[in-house]
Image (spheres, rainbow, N blue to C red):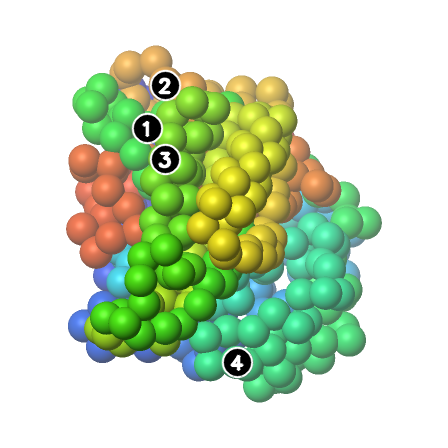
């Protein structure tokens, strides 16, 4: 371990305190919930921009609502290294997923950025989770220049379209292309993030480096049957949508175990939802992840076969709507080596090399730049939950490791 850990710990404490402060910016009192293009997003951008400026960074909001803070001057033609993560959350979230990486980036850019032969740009992406519009990575996809026009019609839970949300946030949908960095000279994208599983905690090691990020697809499945009286309808005349959904949901677990994918049904809605009415529709989401795209895609083919069989047998219909797709991403050797050098500088044990089953902004940014990630220990590995945690010391180590990794790229 070298001396870099000491200032890193102080920077980590400030970054950690800021994660706590940001948790107060929420649309759900008593819980953390901050969604893309909401007043809470705008407020978080304001506060974090203030912290960026305190660290000497020049700030702006891009055409997709992402917050940027750069060591570079206006019109700089130097290459730029992007560091950061996301500022949005899932419902009833923890305080560190995404946020910790943005705070660590600000510390590093402010501290060592000005001495480097390239610009360091910290980005707080507006949407990684996809909580509001179902499609994830909207902020980082705008940056990557892979925005799709069909997304404008996506709606949130209140029926507000993504296009309307842009306008309400003060953005011009016609100018979203201006957020793209596809033609910029990027040295890479480095992200520090909490681990969202228990590997580091179980090994008793504060930091690890990421070799690859899982491939993902998300769907909404609607099963339609027939709404009828719960008492009067004989069993041989029932077309119960919920029973079809129940079988399909169990099949998602079975397919996951058989096909090396991670499948989750996280939301289920039943209509009309009365105690004495046979459910006419059941709508649920399916989140699928795998190490490789082909495993993920094979599981979708199997899921469709299962849905067809269940619906034929029970006299139901189904509709499968894809909400999100992202390919697996391999971290680039150059950034993996820099991340390893960073971690080596601040901890004694060899950094474990981890596969990330969780999604990250790097999945989108990989379309235009090499990507590298450092994971920080998260006690018990719990995330997307209020108990999610990283200690100030570990965040300090992550921040110091990021600083060394950034230097290593010069
Ligand atoms: C984001 O945290 C995801 O993995 O879905
Ligand atoms: Mn998350
Ligand atoms: Mn995250």
- Label 1 belongs to which residue? 207
- Give the quadrant of the C terminus: top right
- Label 4 belongs to which residue? 159
Contact between marks 1 and 2 (CB within 8 A): the answer is yes
Inter-mark Cα distance, 4 to 3? 31 Å
* x 47%, y 81%: residue: 158
- Label 3 belongs to which residue? 253
Contact between marks 4 and 3 (CB within 8 A): the answer is no
Name the disc covering residue 9, or none: none
Closer to the chain start, of discs 4 and 1, is 4
Mark 4 C-beta to ligand 1 under 8 Å: no
Circle 4 residues within 10 Å: few <14, some 14–19, many ≥20: few
Nearer-the-camera pick, 330 or 229 = 229
Closer to the chain start, of discs 3 and 2, is 3
Contact between marks 3 and 1 (CB within 8 A): the answer is no
Circle 2 residues within 10 Å: few <14, some 14–19, many ≥20: many
- Label 2 belongs to which residue? 351
**Disc number lying in front (3 or 2):** 3
* x 46%, y 63%: residue: 225
**Disc number lying in front (3 or 1):** 3
Mark 1 C-beta to ligand 3 under 8 Å: no
Q: Answer yes or no: is residue 217 visible.
A: no
> Circle 4 — which element?
loop
Circle 1 residues within 10 Å: few <14, some 14–19, many ≥20: many
């Amino acid at each position: 371990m070298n001396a870099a850990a000491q200032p890193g710990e102080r920077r980590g404490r400030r970054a950690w305190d800021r994660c706590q402060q940001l948790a107060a910016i929420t649309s759900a009192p008593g819980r953390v919930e901050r969604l893309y293009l909401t007043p809470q997003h705008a407020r978080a951008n304001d506060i974090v921009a203030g912290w960026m400026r305190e660290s000497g960074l020049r700030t702006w909001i891009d055409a997709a609502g992402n917050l940027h803070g750069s060591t570079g001057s206006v019109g700089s033609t130097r290459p730029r290294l992007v560091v950061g993560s996301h500022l949005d959350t899932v419902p009833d979230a923890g305080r560190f997923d995404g946020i910790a990486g943005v705070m660590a980036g600000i510390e590093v850019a402010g501290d060592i950025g000005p001495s480097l032969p390239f610009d360091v740009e910290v980005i707080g992406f507006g949407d990684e989770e996809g909580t509001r519009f179902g499609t994830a990575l909207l902020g980082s996809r705008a940056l990557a220049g892979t925005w799709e026009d069909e997304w404008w019609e996506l709606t949130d839970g209140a029926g507000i379209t993504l296009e309307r949300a842009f306008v309400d946030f003060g953005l011009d949908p016609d100018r979203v292309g201006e957020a793209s960095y596809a033609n910029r000279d990027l040295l890479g994208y480095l992200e520090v993030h909490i681990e969202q599983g228990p590997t580091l905690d179980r090994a008793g090691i504060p930091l690890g480096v990421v070799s690859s990020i899982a491939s993902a697809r998300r769907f909404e499945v609607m099963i339609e049957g027939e709404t009828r009286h719960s008492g009067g309808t004989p069993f041989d005349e029932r077309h119960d949508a919920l029973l079809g959904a129940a079988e399909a949901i169990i099949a998602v677990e079975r397919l996951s175990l058989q096909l090396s994918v991670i499948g989750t049904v996280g939301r289920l809605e039943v209509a009309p939802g009365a105690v004495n009415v046979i459910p006419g529709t059941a709508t649920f989401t399916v989140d699928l992840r795998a190490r490789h795209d082909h495993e993920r895609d094979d599981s979708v083919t199997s899921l469709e076969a299962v849905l067809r069989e269940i619906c034929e047998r029970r006299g139901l219909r189904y509709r499968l709507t894809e909400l999100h797709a992202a390919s697996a991403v391999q971290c680039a050797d150059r950034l993996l080596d820099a991340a390893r050098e960073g971690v080596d500088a601040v901890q004694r044990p060899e950094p474990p090399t981890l596969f990330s089953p969780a999604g990250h902004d790097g999945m989108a940014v990989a379309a235009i730049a090499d990507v590298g990630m450092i994971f920080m220990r998260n006690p018990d590995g719990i995330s997307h939950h209020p108990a999610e945690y990283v200690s100030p010391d570990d965040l300090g180590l992550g921040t110091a490791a990021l600083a060394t990794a950034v230097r290593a790229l010069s």
